[in-house]
Amino acid sequence: MEIVYLLVPLTLLLVAVGIGIFSWAVKNGQYDDLDGPAHQILYDDDKDMIPPGARANTNDAAETESPTPSDNPEDPPRR
């Protein structure tokens, strides 16, 4: 029975800390936009991050490509 005198205040303290953390998160805007990040992953914005010389759809990248090992006639065939 003496353990109840320890566990009840400890439980109330933990509940108070949880409510405090939740209210802090609400005040700081953690729950403002729940759908935005879920939809943002669907947008294709990779072209902004690719350097202009490395893009596959530019003519400059096709002219400056180095030959691959299979293009070199001196290389033995791969097995």
Image (cartoon, rainbow, N blue to C red):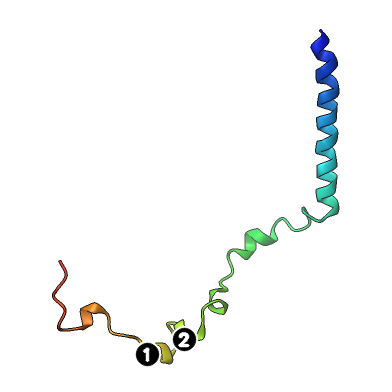
> 31 or 77: nearer the eye?
77
Q: Name the residue under label 2.
A: 53
Q: Would residue 70 be found to the left or right of residue 54 on screen?
A: left
Q: In this view, does 1 lie to the left or right of 63?
A: right
Say whether marks 2 and 1 touch (CB < 8 Å): yes
Tag 1: amino acid: Thr
Residue 48, image x and y in percent? 57, 78
Which residue is located at x 80 percent, y 37 percent? Answer: 18
Which percent across, then down, holds residue 69?
Answer: 23, 78
* Mark 2, secondary structure of its residue: helix
Look at the picture and state if 17 lies above or below 27.
Answer: above
Q: Is 36 in front, or is 73?
A: 73
Residue 67, by quadrant, is bottom left
Report the label total: 2
Identify residue for label 1: 64
- Looking at the rendered structure, the kind of residue marked 2 is Gly
Lower position in the chain sequence, tag 2 or tag 1: 2
Compared with 76, 62 (above or below) is: below
